[in-house]
């Protein structure tokens, strides 16, 4: 089975989430607990492997104490 290529926006979004998580001193596990998402799912988002839903974007923004639009600030495709 051929692996699907990662989209540039998913990669950029994942990098942004990782930077925000680390800037708050959170491990993936602690961040997953805060966002009520699985740790492996968070890892997939940060690697750009996931095409994340709006519902999960909201959970991540809430866990980071940010507005949704702030997750996309300076996001490069």
Image: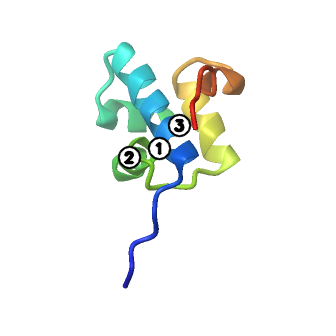
Q: Residue at x 35, y 46 (%)?
A: 43
| Residue to which mark 1 is pinned | 11
Q: Residues within 10 Å of mark 1 (few under 14, many from 20)?
A: many
Q: Residue at x 64, y 51 (%)?
A: 53
| Residue to which mark 3 is pinned | 13
What is the quadrant of residue 72 in the picture? Answer: top right
Residue at the outermost bottom position? 1
What is the quadrant of residue 30 in the picture? Answer: top left
Is label 3 in contact with label 1 (beta carbons under 8 Å)?
Answer: yes
**How far apart in space, not on screen, are marks 2 and 3 (Cα)?**
9 Å
**Label 1 or label 2, whichever comes before in sequence order:** 1
| Residue 47, numbered circle | 2
Residue 11 is situated, as x and y percent measured from the top left of the image, at 47, 43
User: Relative to 44, is 76 on the left or the right?
Assistant: right
| Residue 72, numbered circle | none
Q: Residues within 10 Å of mark 2 (few under 14, many from 20)?
A: some
């Amino acid at each position: 089975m051929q692996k699907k290529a990662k989209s540039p926006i998913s990669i950029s979004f994942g990098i942004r989430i990782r930077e925000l998580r680390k800037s708050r001193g959170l491990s993936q596990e602690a961040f997953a607990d805060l966002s009520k998402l699985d740790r492996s799912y968070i890892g997939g988002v940060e690697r750009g492997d996931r095409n994340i839903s709006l519902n999960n974007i909201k959970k991540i923004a809430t866990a980071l104490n940010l507005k949704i639009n702030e997750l996309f600030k300076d996001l490069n495709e």
